Image: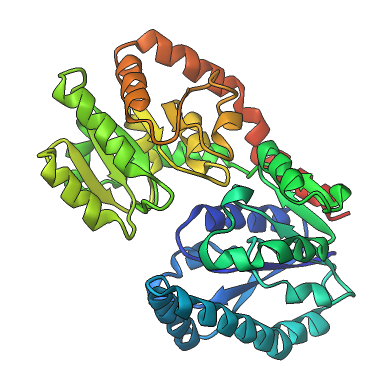
Amino acid sequence: MKKILFYLPFIKVGGIEKVSIEYLTGLINKGYKVDLIIDFDMAKYGNTFEYAIPKEVNYKYIKSEKVSKFIYYFRTLGKKNKIFNVFLYGFIILFDFYYYHTKVKKILEKEKYDYTISFFQFLPSYITNFKKTKHIIWLHGSVEHFFGGIKNLFKANYEKKLNKYDSIVTIANEMQEQLEEFYPKLEKEKIKMIYNPFNFNEIIKKSNMIDNLTKDEKLLIKDNYICTVTRVDEHQKDLTTLILAYEKQYLNNKIKDKLYIIGDGPSRDNLTELVKDKKLEKQILFLGKKTNPFIWMKKANVFILSSKFEGFGLVLVEAMVVNTFVISSNCKTGPTEILDNEKCGDLFAVGSVNELSDKLQYALNNDKYRDNKIANATQNLERFNFNESINNLTRLLK
């Protein structure tokens, strides 16, 4: 039985964490012995997916709750002061070096793993110093958006970091092309593309659990609506474009559907104020986080992703699985590939209020158009099948 050490930054609500749970489950089902180390212990503040870790997986946190809170407090300050941010990054690098030698290295020496899987592009690479084990790193974002601000200082060194790993996994073909273009000195035979795994049956099952909704939620879901499921963070998700596109069609009496924004994040207060300024509080509703967003996706007339950039765009596939028509920004990376160049849904230019507005209005007023693209999407889903992705990973582990 091969032993795998899985390495995550957090176990909070998010696409990376959701996918990691699928892989942990898949590896256990394939007979692997899997342990999990998690960099930050956010405890009651954010270990949201801890309950979903398979019971067969032994897991532990590297940094204590106090240390994790301390680092994140200073990260918040660092976002407001660039000079402070430089010192903060240096401090975190020293911290990671210390924890590798005092904790991670001891775990590696004791357990004698066949592979480690660093499931995030910015986890420290000290783990690759342990040469008795093979190491895999997973990339989850558009490569051109990896860097910005203080991270630019590490841009040139990142290629060296990646080459320390035995395998580098991207989650979209476009991401792999970006990576090879961005870092031409990377050993190309190390780079593998594996789509994120989706458990179609589980998504469909959860999408039908309407009885689990509260009385108020059951009233909301009876309305005609369009929706998005997202982290409410304007740095990436660009919900302003979605709100303005919706406003344009609503004020022109072209659509009557409400807009439900499902999720939470740092931009929620500012966007709520924007909606109030537009006097659209009754039409645009912020519903917060939902433990089961699939019910809302299934009942929506249109699902929209308005991001400036993505790693993949998990929610697009999830919406397709529950037979909902999808409109997405044509951002890097993922949407164009997922929607097969608009055969399975519609794309609009990043930040284009007019284009999104027009596509939304056309889709809502053309049932046959939506149905044809939904049918195409259903036929194209198999490439994201859970078993296909797990099998691709196990081939990498041979």
Compared across the picture, whether 183 is left or right of 69 comes to right
Q: Residue at coordinates 68% horizontally, 84% vertically from top-left? A: 97
Q: Residue at coordinates 29% horizontally, 13% vertically from top-left? A: 365
What scheme was used to colour the molecule? rainbow
In which quadrant will I find the C terminus? bottom right
Residue 155 locus on image (x, y percent): 66, 62
The quadrant in which residue 244 appears is top left
Compared across the picture, whether 79 is left or right of 176 comes to left
The quadrant in which residue 255 appears is top left
Compared across the picture, whether 132 is left or right of 385 comes to right
In the foreground, 13 or 56:
13
**Outermost residue, front direction?**
83
Q: Tell me if I can see residue 215 in this picture.
A: no
Up the image or down, 356 lies above or below 12; here it is above
Up the image or down, 327 lies above or below 40; here it is above
Q: Tell me if I can see residue 91 in this picture.
A: yes
In the foreground, 200 or 64:
64
In which quadrant will I find the N terminus? bottom right
Compared across the picture, whether 264 is left or right of 49 comes to left
Residue 269 locus on image (x, y percent): 22, 57
Residue 181 locus on image (x, y percent): 74, 44
Q: Residue at coordinates 74% horizontally, 77% vertically from top-left? A: 126
Residue 197 locus on image (x, y percent): 63, 44
Up the image or down, 366 lies above or below 209; here it is above
In the foreground, 173 or 285:
173
Count of numbered badges drawn on the protein:
0
